[in-house]
Image (tube, rainbow, N blue to C red):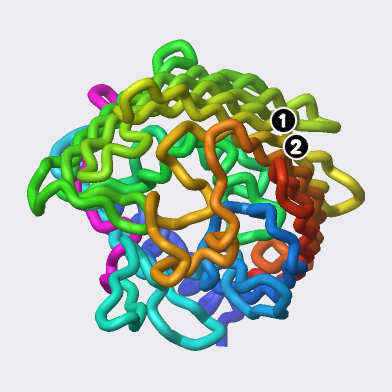
Amino acid sequence: MNIHTPIAAAALLLAAATALAQTTPPPTSNVSVYGIIDIAVSKADTGQSNLAHFSDWQIGTRGAWTMHSSSSARLGLKGSEVLDGDLRANFLIEHRFQPDTGSTEPRDGVTYTGGVRSYNAGFWNSQAWVGLSSQRWGELRLGRTATPHFNVGIASDPWGYEYNVASFAGYTRGGNFVAAQRNSALYLSPKFRGLSVQLGVGLGEGGTSATATGSPNGRNVGAALQYNEGPLWLALAWNDSHRSDAINNRSTMLAGSLDLGWIKPMANLSFGQNNVAGNPTTTTWLLGAHMPVGTGTVRLAVGRYDPAKGFNPNAVTPGATVATTPNPYAAFPVTNGQATAKLGLGYVHPLSKRTSLSADVGIAKTETYSRSLGVQTGLKHVF
């Protein structure tokens, strides 16, 4: 047998495969699965000051060890299709769940029937949208989307709005908790010399009632202007929500960060205004940072929450009574002038690109109330 025969055959097969790969067009559509699954264990002492403005299912009741999802565990599908040239069709649907119990994550509020609490939850009640995009004209999303105000706020919290005793979710929004808008259209512009714009509107379909987590059924309008070039990020965001309780229906946010390599400082200053007669403005601010230490990252921040008249930051639903709210601090109502100061510190240690361990501590003090201390540790896997 000629030794060159199999070598020549292999060479011909390799050449044919290479030619086929060069002539086969790239796929015009794709769909991928993604998600986060994590478990955290936390405990807050019996102090009366609000640690993070979260519900009991998010960080637990006071004085008890609680297991929960910290990063808001989720399962999502996303995809795109090339339509013509630069034009693409895109979609995203995202389900959030509680891995400690296997149940759907409560979203969009709490209702009470005969004193029994129940959560309003939908399977895709995180994000669910379809849209069109191009590098030249930007992107349009239709469905349930995050508000521009929320997108800026989450980028300026060192904990990214995690369900964490150290998180500063309540200290970046000027008292406004509108995170998602239903029946919405969201436009994201292309970036031009570092500048980009987000514009969103949620239609008034379904009425004007407010819900416990602040996602309104009524009309919502928001916008954000961002500069992101090199290590510098600056943002200005605004949101106007028409809710039946009219609490904190208008808010403005200034945020920024600067990545210096050895440290990434970040800041947020927000103002909220409701239409209660003679009402002052709610003011929230934070100064925080990410610092690489070893293979991990230290997260730290200080912040303050100055509430306006008519808004109780210790209650999930403004005006709710102790008997009808799942917030662990609702028994200690805060009035205008009683500010809350907070300190958060934590560390994230990566075990791989997808898996990490974390440990955090949060301390808060509201005027006239006792100090609160919370600790938390967790394991996260991203896929």
The stretch drawn in magenta includes residue 311: no
What's under tag 1, amino acid-wise?
A: Leu
In this rendering, position of residue 11 left or right of residue 275: right
What is the crowding at mark 1: few (fewer than 14 residues within 10 Å), some, or many (at least 20)? some
Q: Position of residue 237 (x, y in %)?
A: 42, 24
- Compared with residue 250, is residue 43 higher up or lower down, i.e. above or below? below
Magenta residue span: 120-142
Q: Please name the residue shown 54% across and 40% down the image.
A: 335
Q: Report the residue that reaches farthest toward the top.
A: 193
Q: Front-most of 376 and 176?
A: 176
What's under tag 2, amino acid-wise?
A: Val
Q: Which residue is mark 2?
A: 302
Q: Is residue 189 visible?
A: yes
Q: Which residue is mark 1?
A: 287
The stretch drawn in magenta includes residue 129: yes
- Tag 1 and tag 2, C-beta contact below 8 Å: yes
